[in-house]
Amino acid sequence: MLTEEVYFYYQSPLSNLYLTVTGLQILKLEYDPQQKECFQKLLPDGEIKSWLDSYFSGQPQQQVPAIKIKGTAFQQKVWEVMLKIPYGETLSYGDVSNILDSAPRAVGQACKRNPVPILIPCHRIVAKQSIGGYEGATSGHRLDRKQWLLNHETPQ
């Protein structure tokens, strides 16, 4: 039996976040959805909102809410590595490629295709000499988001 997809938005200090949810599982988290008009409901109280509130207050919960995402076997492996990177820490694309015996560019492509950024913290994967890219961009507002997230997680 299929569960209907429901669309919510969440007001974060970074920007509005747009979530596609089925049942209690997150399918997608977006910053700029193509069909923004679908996201009319504010995210209600519950596990997902509690996790996001904790994250943005600087005290994230260890357990990420339930997600239901699709990806290749390799993408799934990269996303599993990302989930193990502690809050406030980073790994380089090269570090992850060494863990998985793959190429750094392949890791970058898996990051780009992450359907639930922040929850699966692709922003914690950086280049050796810079913060790298984010959401497929190497400059502009997308990279500004990555910098914001990294700054948010850095102890003051």
Image (cartoon, rainbow, N blue to C red):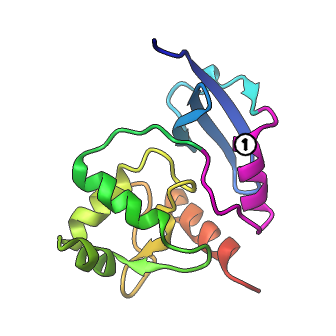
When asked about the image quadrant of residue 46, the answer is top right
Q: Residue at 50% of width from left, 73% of height from top?
A: 85
Q: Position of residue 132 (x, y in %)?
A: 40, 73
Horizontal and vertical percent for residue 5? 55, 20
Residue 78 in sight from this viewpoint? yes
Task: Say if residue 138 shows up in the picture.
Answer: no
Residue at 50% over, 47% down: 116
Q: Quadrant of the N terminus?
A: top left
Label 1 packing within 10 angstroms: few (<14), some (14-19), many (20+): few
Magenta-drawn segment: 44-65
Q: Mark 1 points at which residue?
A: 47
Q: Is residue 83 above or below residue 127?
A: above
Above or below, 77 against 25 in this view is: below
Quarter of the rendering occupied by the C terminus: bottom right
Q: Is mark 1 on a helix, strand or loop?
A: helix
Determine the residue positioned at 61% across, 46% down: 65
Kind of residue indicated by mark 1: Glu
Residue 40 is inside the magenta segment: no
Task: Identify which residue, 66 or 149, lies in the foreground.
Answer: 66
Residue located 33% across and 61% down the image? 78
Please count the marks in the image. Answer: 1
Question: For residue 30, what is the image quadrant?
Answer: top right
> Is residue 60 in the magenta section?
yes
Tell me if 82 is positioned left or right of 66 in this view: left
Extreme residue toward the top, this view: 1
Where does residue 11 sit, x and y in percent of width and height? Answer: 76, 44
Residue at the extreme left: 102
Q: Horizontal and vertical percent for residue 108? A: 31, 64
Instruction: Relative to 65, say whether 41 is above or below.
Output: above
